[in-house]
Amino acid sequence: MQIVIVGAGPTGVTLALLLAKRGIAVTLIEAAKDFHRVFRGEGLMPSGLDALEQMGLSPLLEHIPHRQIDAWEFILGDKQLFRVDEPMGATRPCTLVSQPPLLKALISEAQTHDGFEFIQGVPVKDLRWSNQRVAGVVLSDGRELNADLVIGADGRNSLVRQRIGLELVRQPKNIDILWFKLAASPGFAADNVFRTIVNGDRVFTIFHGAESGKLHLAWVMSATENTDSKQANWGEIFASLSPSWLAEHFRNHADTIESPIRLSVVVGYCPQWHVPGVLLLGDAAHPMSPVRVQGINLAFRDVIVAANHLVLLLHREAGHQDIDMALSHIQAERQPEIIRAQQLQLEEAKQGELLRKNALLRSLLIQLAPLLRKIIKKSWLRRQYKMRQGITQVHLTV
């Protein structure tokens, strides 16, 4: 039986590899000519690291750029509100991994298996239909590929999703972020702390990414943002909002601050992930908020559940009706975790928005921080557990 997977991001590549390792013929299609996009999430939570281990892929991390998060810290004004050290009760700390080399390594592994084909730099233009069921894809170069199942893993703007007429239920507003890179300070290299800084109504996060010598900085844009991102003196803006040691780094390395990338992040979910002959997975089915880096972790867990339901059917060359029935079972198993994770992300985002908008609350927290620190820290930790460990049980059984 022939499977076509559209999109060679974390979802598509890992599923293609799992199927190819189990002797199933897979064609993986990627529109882009390389894996270097303007933005790729790097954060692997304990749930994502566990999924990689279950798939036998953990050793790959040792051969590509990666870096552990040592702690999470919240700074209000110029004072520490609280700090929590990794791994926060888990067996593994949150780990940042550079996606392009990870995807290349996964592709290289898949190419060692017969029946795996990778088509890169040729977009899917349309889907092929037969008797009201999707039967393959049409590529932009005119080629037509037959498939017993097409899997749309082509991200939050999924063409596959558009072609089968399934729509996202979107959260009321997008999350707008300016994403910066700049030279790292020795302090971050020695102690990689994911810091969230709230000063007045400004909020940004900063940490050392997987790439050597680079700090990543996410500036959360407000609805009334009027800063000219290209003309702004970002070194001085960041310095004015930061503790003295970090302000000095911004001023000394202002010339290394790269021009920001604006990200307008769509968040939502598909009430239905499938039609006959097609399954949506990862961001194609449920684009996640960037809050607490859930996207790649949930994508790996989608892959495990999809493999559990599909591998045996494909091995015995089950009929299309049985395959289509399995698609609904995959959604039914995955959807509760997705919906709950998005609720938790939204609750976390609302906490930050309340703090950003409410000057009185910020003032009270700064004054009472020594008294409230333990209570606030405990509350934050309680909210993080499920987003780090996973909300449902996911085990690879094939």
Image: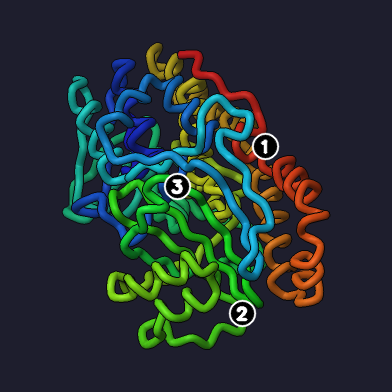
Q: Residue at x 21, y 51 (%)?
A: 34
Judge depth for marks 1 and 3 and give the one in front: 3
Distance CA(mark 3)–CA(mark 2) = 31 Å
Left or right: where 182 falls relative to 92: left
Q: Earlier in the sequence, mark 2 or mark 1?
A: 2
Camera-side residue: 387 or 138? Answer: 387
Residues at circles 2 and 1 in contact by the CB criterion of under 8 Å: no
Q: Any mark on residue 385, and which?
A: 1
Residue 342 location, x and y as percent? 65, 49
Disc 3 is placed on an element classified as loop
Image quadrant assignment for residue 307: top left
Find residue 289 and report its image quarter.
bottom right
- Left of 296 or right of it: where is 365? right
Mark 3 or mark 2: name the one nearer the start of the chain. 3
Mark 2: amino acid: Ala
Instruction: Please report whichever mark, 1 or 3, sits nearer to the chain's N-terminal start.
Output: 3
Q: Nearer the viewer, residue 232 or 153?
A: 232
Could you say which disc has been placed on residue 192 in the image?
3
**80 relative to 232 in the view: left or right:** right
**CA separation in Å, label 2 and label 1:** 30 Å
| Residue 157 image position (x, y, % from top left) | 44, 58
**Crowding at mark 1 (Cα within 10 Å: few <14, some 14-19, many 20+):** some
**Residue drawn 43% across and 39% down?**
68
Residue at x 28% of width, y 32% of height: 106
In this rendered view, identify the residue nearer to me: 33 or 242. Answer: 242
Residue at image position (67%, 44%) is 339
Residue 103 at x, y percent in the picture = 29, 39
Residue occupied by mark 2: 223
Q: Answer above or below: position of 300 versus 137.
A: above
For label 2, count other residues whose C-alpha is less than 10 Å away and answer few (under 14), some (14-19) or many (20+): few
